[in-house]
Structure formats: structure tokens, C-alpha cells
Amino acid sequence: MKAVLLLSTRIVYSTMAFAELVLWQLPKPLPGCTHRVKYRLAYVVRETCVLRYDNEAGKGDHRHYAGKECAYRFSDPDKLIADFQTDITRWNHENRHT
């Protein structure tokens, strides 16, 4: 089985902000992961990536938020996207005056 693209989309929030979501179903898990989904989700504001979820080979599931990298507990693609959207809402709230 080859990798199958599950989702590839860009969501425009404003003239200065967008999210890009890419998810693949893999034939086997990446090193550092127990599931077969490869993903990268990024929220970009004013040409700067302010939030990112990804699972690059060897690092496993993790997210980048507020300049810090921390582990992320992946369960399924729907939960991943919901958590990402929650963090976008949180980031927008925390940075609404900047």
C-alpha cells in the first residue's frame, strides 16, 4: 500500500492569517509513532508560523505553541483537527491586542 492523502487544505482566516492542514495515511507508522497517520498542521499569522502540530520521523507526535515544543497525544485525525482548532482559538484570544 502506498501513502494515501487524507486531507490537504488551506483555511484563510483573514488577510494576515491562514491554516494549512495536510494528513496522510501511511502503510506503516513513522519511527516514533504508534499510528499510521503522518500530519502537519500550521497556523500562520503575518507570515510567521505561530502554531504547528506535526510528527516528523523520529520525533513522534508533538506540537509547537508559544515558542515551545511539547508532546502531543494523537488519537485520531478528527481529534487532531479539533485540538488544532482549539489552539488557534486560544492563540487568537491570547494575542487579540497585538
Image: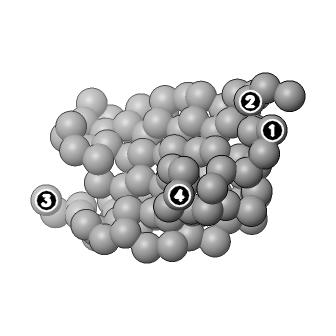
The residue drawn where x is 75% and y is 38% is 25
Q: Write down the residue under mark 3.
A: 98
Q: At 43% across and 40% down in the image, what residue appears?
A: 19
The quarter of the rendered structure image containing the C terminus is: bottom left
Q: Are marks 1 and 2 in contact (CB under 8 Å)?
A: yes
Nearest to N terminus: mark 2 or mark 3: 2
Closer to the camera in the image, 56 or 48: 56
Mark in the foreground, 3 or 4: 4
- Tell me: 6 left or right of 66: right
Q: Distance between the residues labelled 3 and 1?
A: 43 Å
Residue type, numbered disc 4:
Gly
Q: How far, Cα to Cα, is label 1 from label 2?
A: 6 Å
Q: Quadrant of residue 42?
A: top left
Asked if residue 60 shows in the view, the reply is yes
x and y percentages locating residue 28 in the rendered image: 78, 45
Between residues 12 and 34, which one lies in front from this camera angle? 34
Q: Earlier in the sequence, mark 1 or mark 4?
A: 1
Q: Quadrant of the N terminus?
A: top right
For the question of whether residue 86 can be seen, the reply is: no
* Spot occupied by residue 93 in the image (x, y as percentages of width and height): 33, 66
Mark 1 vs 2, N-terminal side: 2
Q: Against 49, is 9 above or below?
A: above
Task: Check whether the beta carbons of the residues at disc 2 and disc 4 lie within 8 A of each other.
Answer: no
In three-dimensional space, the C-alpha distance between marks 2 and 4, rounded to whole angstroms, equals 18 Å
The circle on residue 58 is 4
Q: Given this view, does label 3 or label 1 mark the residue nearer the observer?
A: 1
Tag on residue 3? 2
